[in-house]
Amino acid sequence: MKFARKPRIPAAEPASPRVINELVEIADYISHLRQEIAALRANELTRDRIPMAHEELGNVLAATAGATNQIMASAESMLSLPHDASYRENVEAHIYEIFEACAFQDITGQRISKVVEALRQLELRLARFASAVKARDEAGYDPTEAERRKRADVLLLNGPQIDGPATSQDDIDALFA
Amino acid sequence: MALDLSMPILVVDDYQTMVRIIRNLLKQLGFEEVDDASDGTAALARLKSRKYGLVISDWNMEPMTGYELLRHVRADEGLRTTPFIMVTAESKTENVIAAKKAGVNNYIVKPFNAATLKTKIEAVCGA
C-alpha cells in the first residue's frame, strides 16, 4: 500500500533573543495598558457618575427656577398689596415665603458638591490614564466645533466674564456720552 | 420732554426670569404696555406686527442673537428709527463698540438696577 507523501514543512528557525525580548516588552505594555484601562472604570463613569451629574444639575436648575419664581411671585404680590390695616401682616407673610424659597441654596449646594466630586474623579482618572499611555491630543478637525467657534467669533458671543464685567457701566456710559 | 408712559415696549430675552424682572421694573416706572419675545426671530415678527416705542434686548440668544436683531432693525426701512437698548452680560469693550457701530442707542451691562434702567430709558426716549 502506497502512502501519499506529506509535503515537508520547513522547521521554524529559533527566534533571536532580541525578538523574544521585544515580544515580552510588547506583552508587558499590553498588560499595563489593560490595567490602566481597567483603572479608568469607564463603565462606572458612564453608567453611574455621569448620569448622576446630569440628574443633579437638572435638579439644581429646576430648584433655582422654582425658588426664583416663588421669590418673584411673593415680591409681585407685595407690590400689589392694598395699603390697609393688614398691610404689615400681609407683607410679613410674603417675606416668610421668600425666606422659605431661599432654602433651595442649601440643597443645591449639596447637589453641586456631588457633581464637583464626580468631575474630580473623572479628571483624576483621565489624567492618570493620559500619563500612563503618554497620550497626545490629536490636532483633528471637528466641523461642529469649528462652526460653533466661527459663530461665536462673528457674533461676539463671549458670555459673562468670570471676575465680573470686563467693562464697567461707567466706562460704557462714557462711550455713549 | 416727558416720557411717554403709554408707548409699547418690547423686551427680548430667552431667560423668562429676566423678562419678568424687566417687566416689573418697567411697571414700577409706569410703563404698562410691555410685550416680550424669547429671541431675535420672535422679536422681529412682533416688531413687524406692532409699532414699538422701545426695544430692550439681551445679546446672547438662540437662534437669532440680540446683535443680529439690532442689525436687522437698523437695516429695515420701517424699523430703523426704533430706539434700542441692549441689556446684556456681554461686557467686553469689543461688544459695546460693535453694538454702538450697529446703531444701538444705549447699553446696560448685567447685573443692573432699576435706577440704571430708568436713566437709560430717559436718555434714549427723551425725558
Image: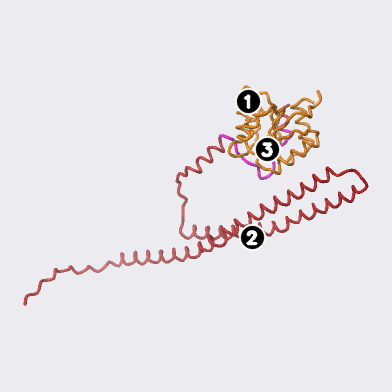
Chain colours: A red, B orange
Q: Position of residue A33 (x, y in %)?
A: 44, 63
- Chain where mark 3 sits: B
The residue that disc 3 covers is B88
- Chain where mark 2 sits: A
Residue A168 within the segment the image draws in magenta: yes
- Chain where mark 1 sits: B
Of all residues shown, which one is farthest toward the front? B49
Alpha carbon separation for disc pair 3 and 1? 19 Å
Quadrant in the rendering for residue A53 = bottom right
Q: Residue at 13% across / 71% down in the picture?
A: A6
Alpha carbon separation for disc pair 3 and 2? 31 Å
**Amino acid type, residue under disc 3 in the picture:** Thr
The dot on residue B74 is: 1
**Amino acid type, residue under disc 1 in the picture:** Arg
Dot 2 crowding, Cα within 10 Å, few <14, some 14–19, many 20+:
some
Is label 2 in a helix, a strand or a loop? helix
Q: Is residue A42 left or right of residue B67?
A: left
Q: Quadrant of the N terminus of chain A?
A: bottom left
Alpha carbon separation for disc pair 2 and 1? 48 Å
